[in-house]
C-alpha cells in the first residue's frame, strides 16, 4: 500500500483568546441568548405557580438546558479535536448517543460536591474545592467525551494515554482556564444576586454558564487537535503526512483513537484497498456500534463496505444482528436485506437467524422483494413465537399474494 493521509493543521499560534471568542460566533451566540431568555422567563413565571408545579418546571427547565448545552459542548470538543473549523463541520459531526447525559452525570456530581462544601464549610471550602476540581475536570471531561463512557474515569490505561497526549504545561493552562472561568462565575453570581432581580440574575448566570462551558470545551478540543498533529508529525517535529503503513503499524502496536481509525478507513476507501478494508473494517464498525454507540456512522460505514463486498459481516453473530437492527432503525431497508443474507450465509445455524429474517421482512414491508417473500413464508411455516407471530401478522398484508 502506498499513499499518505493528509492532516489539517490549525494555527500554531492559537491562544486561549480563540476559546473565549469561539462561543460568540454568529451561529452560537443566539443559542446562548435563547438559553438566557428561557431561564429568565421561567423565573418570572415561577412565583405564580403552586410550589409543586414551580419545582417541577424549574427542574425540567434546568435539566433540559443542561442536556442541550452539554450536547453542543461535547460536539464542540470532539469536532474541534477532529479538525473542524466551519459551522457545517460542527453541525454534521456525528455525536455518540447519550454523550450529553454522561457529561451531565459527571458535571452534576461535581456540582453536588461543591454545593455540599458550600453548605457545610462555606465559600472558602468552595474555592478550595474549585482548585481541586481544576486538577481533575479537564482530564475527566476529555475521557468521558472521547470514550463516551463513564467507565473511562476508573481506567488507569486511559489516564496514562491522556497524560502522554497532553503535556503537564498545557494541562496546567487548561486547569487555569477552568479556575478563571469558575471564579468569574462565583463573582458574577454574587454581584448579580446583590444588584439584580432574581429573574434577571438567573438569565445572566445561564448565559455566562453556557458561554463558559462552550469556551472550556473548545479549549480542550483545540489542545487535543494540536497534540494529535504533534503525535503524527515527523521525528523532527514538523507536521507531515502519515503513510497508511505507518498508521496501520501504530494502530496494531499501540492502538489509537476513534479518529485514527476513521483516518485509516477513509484512506483505505480512497485507495480501493479491499484487503485492508476487509481486515480493519469489521473491527472499526464494531467499535462504532458497540463501544461508542455511534449507530448512524456504523451503518454508513457498513453500507460502503457492503458495496465493496456483499458478503461483509462483523466478527460475531450478535454484533451483526445489532448492525442489522441499526440499519432498519436508520432507514436502510436494502442494506438490511444484504446484511441479513450475509448473516445467514456466514452463520446458517445461528439462533438469531429467525430474528434477522423477521427484521428484514419488516424493513421491506413497504416494497417486499422476492427474497423477503421467501423469508416471510419460511417464518410463518417455522411455528414462530407469540411475539414473532404478532410482528408477522402486522406486516402480513404486504406479503399476501394478490
Image (cartoon, rainbow, N blue to C red):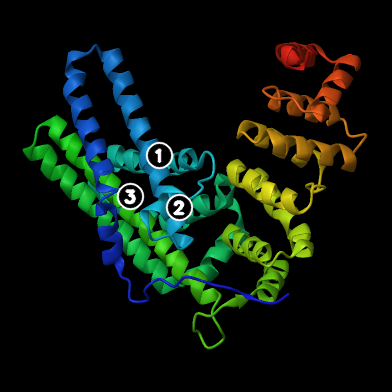
Residue 369 percent coordinates (x, y): 77, 28
| Residue identifier under label 1 | 108
Can you tell which quarter of the image residue 157 is in? bottom right
Chain-order first, disc 3 or disc 2: 2
Query: Local crowd at mark 3 within 10 Å, few (<14), some, or many (≥20)?
Result: many
Give the alpha-carbon distance from disc 1 to disc 2, as whole Å.
12 Å
Residue nearer the viewer, 225 or 155: 225
In the structure shown, which secondary structural element does the residue marked by tag 2 occupy? helix
Instruction: Report whether 260 appears left or right of 369.
Output: left
Which residue is most to the left?
195
Chain-order first, disc 3 or disc 1: 1
Give the alpha-carbon distance from disc 3 to disc 1, as whole Å.
13 Å
Q: Nearer the viewer, mark 3 or mark 1?
A: 3
Can you tell which quarter of the image residue 196 is in? top left
| Residue identifier under label 2 | 141
Query: Local crowd at mark 1 within 10 Å, few (<14), some, or many (≥20)?
Result: few
Chain-order first, disc 1 or disc 2: 1
Q: Residue at x 74, y 65 (%)?
A: 273
| Residue identifier under label 3 | 213
Q: Residue at x 33, y 51 (%)?
A: 214
Instruction: Report whether 316 appears left or right of 298.
Output: right
Residue 318 percent coordinates (x, y): 78, 38
Q: Residue at x 32, y 57 (%)?
A: 178
Indicate the quadrant containing the C terminus: top left, top right, bottom left or bottom right.
top right
Amino acid at each position: 500500500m502506498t499513499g499518505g493521509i493528509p492532516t489539517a493543521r490549525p494555527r500554531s499560534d492559537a491562544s486561549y483568546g480563540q476559546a473565549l471568542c469561539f462561543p460568540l460566533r454568529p451561529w452560537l451566540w443566539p443559542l446562548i441568548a435563547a438559553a438566557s431568555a428561557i431561564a429568565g422567563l421561567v423565573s418570572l413565571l415561577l412565583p405564580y405557580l403552586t410550589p409543586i408545579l414551580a419545582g417541577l418546571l424549574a427542574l425540567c427547565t434546568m435539566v433540559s438546558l443542561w442536556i442541550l448545552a452539554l450536547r453542543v459542548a461535547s460536539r464542540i470538543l470532539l469536532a474541534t479535536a477532529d479538525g473542524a473549523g466551519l459551522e457545517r463541520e460542527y453541525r454534521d459531526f456525528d455525536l455518540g448517543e447519550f454523550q450529553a447525559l454522561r457529561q451531565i452525570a459527571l458535571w452534576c456530581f461535581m456540582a453536588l460536591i461543591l454545593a455540599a462544601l458550600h453548605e457545610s464549610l462555606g465559600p472558602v471550602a468552595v474555592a478550595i474545592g474549585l482548585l481541586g476540581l481544576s486538577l481533575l475536570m479537564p482530564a475527566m471531561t476529555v475521557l468521558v467525551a472521547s470514550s463516551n463512557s463513564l467507565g473511562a474515569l476508573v481506567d488507569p490505561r486511559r489516564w496514562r494515554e491522556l497524560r502522554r497526549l497532553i503535556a503537564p504545561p498545557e494541562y496546567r493552562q487548561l486547569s487555569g482556564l477552568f479556575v478563571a472561568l469558575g471564579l468569574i462565575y462565583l463573582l458574577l453570581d454574587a454581584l448579580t444576586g446583590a444588584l439584580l432581580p432574581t429573574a434577571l440574575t438567573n438569565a445572566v448566570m445561564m448565559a455566562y454558564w453556557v458561554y463558559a462551558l462552550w469556551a472550556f470545551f473548545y479549549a480542550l478540543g483545540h489542545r487535543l487537535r494540536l497534540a494529535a498533529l504533534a503525535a503524527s508529525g515527523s521525528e523532527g517535529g514538523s507536521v507531515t503526512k502519515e503513510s497508511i503503513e505507518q498508521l496501520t503499524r501504530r494502530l496494531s502496536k499501540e492502538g489509537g483513537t476513534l479518529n485514527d481509525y476513521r483516518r485509516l478507513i477513509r484512506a483505505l476507501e480512497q485507495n480501493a484497498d479491499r484487503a485492508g478494508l476487509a481486515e480493519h473494517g469489521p473491527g472499526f464498525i464494531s467499535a462504532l456500534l458497540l463501544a461508542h454507540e455511534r449507530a448512524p456512522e456504523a451503518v454508513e460505514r457498513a453500507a460502503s463496505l457492503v458495496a465493496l463486498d456483499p458478503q461483509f459481516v462483523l466478527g460475531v453473530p450478535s454484533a451483526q444482528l445489532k448492525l442489522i437492527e441499526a440499519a432498519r432503525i436508520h432507514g436502510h431497508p436494502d442494506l438490511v436485506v444484504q446484511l441479513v443474507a450475509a448473516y445467514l450465509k456466514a452463520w446458517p445455524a445461528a439462533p438469531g437467524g429467525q430474528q434477522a429474517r423477521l427484521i428484514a421482512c419488516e424493513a421491506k414491508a413497504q416494497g417486499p422483494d422476492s427474497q423477503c417473500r421467501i423469508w416471510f413464508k419460511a417464518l410463518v411455516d417455522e411455528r414462530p413465537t407469540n411475539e414473532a407471530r404478532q410482528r408477522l401478522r402486522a406486516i402480513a398484508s404486504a406479503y399476501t399474494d394478490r
